[in-house]
Amino acid sequence: MDFNDTPEEAEFRAEARAFLSQHLKPKTPGALRSGSREDFLARAKAWQKTKAEGGFAQITWPKEMGGRGGTVMQQVIWGQEEAKFDAPTGPFAIGLGMCIPTVIAFGSDEHKQRYVQKALKGEEIWCQLFSEPSAGSDVAGLKTKAVKDGDEWVINGQKVWTSGAHYSDYGIVLVRTDPNVPKHKGLTMFIVDMKQPGVDVRPIHQASGGSEFNEVYFTDVRIADKDRLGEPGMGWKVALVTLMNERLAVGGSPGPDWKEIMDYARSAGTLSNQAFRDKLADWYVAAQGYKLTKFRTQTALSRGETPGPENSIGKIINANHLQDICNSAIEMQDHFGLIVDKDEAPSDAVFQESFLWAPGLRIAGGTDEILKNIIAERVLGLPQDVRVDKDKTFAEMN
């Protein structure tokens, strides 16, 4: 592995850091979510517009699409540097990281002209509508259906756990268009206007107090055939592009790490506790192991190579790592650990907030169990689980 930037990478890193320093403040706990949701969305849209104007909105996208035409390694460097600042990127992570790349890959020229630039400049927000009550990690088991009616498709059904649907303008929705073939073969993807009649978005109240996920009901929603992404029945192929991007997007560590809990333990006078020091050592080793794994990926990207399957372990490690650290910090705070008010809780309640949504991180983008199966089958070469539904039509199984 090579831990050093090439001269070109070092130059880009310096340029990115200078741009970020000019427009943002260094990261501070809780700063991003201060104020109302409307204020946060306004800041996010303003920052997205600033990035687009500065040529940093989507580093790897071609220039004709509004991107920089840069390398994947430059995108990695930008992500590293932006993470050091209070950058309100959340509302656009799904749209620009998953939905719009799918539109670019499978949409028409009209789609690209209509949607790409507006999303890139922060004018429109997107969501993805995949999961259902009976189709989570096994998304191919979905039941929301679309029936062809002339030049339109009529959609009925329910989606759930849709992040950001309550403030999104558009979405990509995966539906069943043919129940008389095996479940993976009867799916089709569409672009849907989230504000049109028949789309009912209902926020889900979370244990953390927020409502970032939603149920979405479709009742006789009409979508033009021209807003289809890919051919009818090819939705699974289209969805794989989105799902691969999703698992990469949620593979980071967006909460407190060993440094934060060590600082808190030092201030609380428990750093000398041997049991805590044993845990701290485990957290540090796990964090360094993942850091070195990322360096391996970055080295491959820097050399123009394709990263290996080791990148799949990131989400499993980080989600469990985060949950364990936050649980230990809350226990260390004793009865004060029950307080979730930022103004009253120790460390501005950063451990409480992360603890409450950490379980969701273990579900988003594929549960731990699903990802372990992927690693077992595709990395370790172990035999696949028995699948009794592999050659049966969806109608036969339901």
Image (spheres, rainbow, N blue to C red):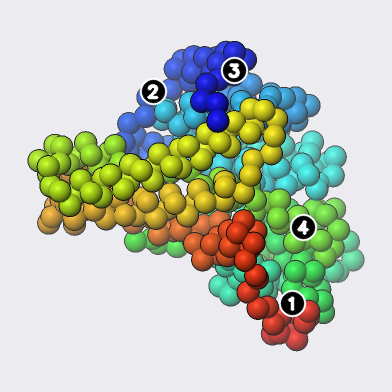
> What separation in Å lies between label 1 and label 2 (alpha carbons)?
52 Å
Mark 2 or 4 closer to N-term?
Answer: 2
**Rendered residue at 63%/33% (across/down):** 300
CB-based contact (under 8 Å), mark 4 and mark 3: no
Amino acid beneath label 3: Thr
Q: Determine whether 336 is above or below 156 in the image.
A: above
Residue annotated with mark 1: 390
Amino acid beneath label 2: Lys
Helix, strand or loop under label 4: helix
Q: Is residue 268 left or right of residue 84?
A: left
Of residues 191 and 82, the one nearer the viewer is 82
Helix, strand or loop under label 2: loop
Mark 3 or 2 closer to N-term?
Answer: 3
Marks 3 and 2: which is nearer the front?
3
Q: Determine whether 177 is above or below 242 in the image.
A: below
> What separation in Å lies between label 2 and label 4 (alpha carbons)?
41 Å
> What separation in Å lies between label 1 and label 4 (alpha carbons)?
16 Å
Amino acid beneath label 4: Lys
Mark 4 or 3 closer to N-term?
Answer: 3
Q: Determine whether 255 is above or below 369 in the image.
A: above
Residue annotated with mark 4: 237
Q: Is residue 301 visible?
A: yes
Marks 2 and 4: which is nearer the front?
4
Residue annotated with mark 3: 6
**Rendered residue at 40%/59% (across/down):** 359
Marks 1 and 4: which is nearer the front?
1
Q: Is residue 274 left or right of residue 150?
A: left
Q: Is residue 104 left or right of residue 9?
A: right
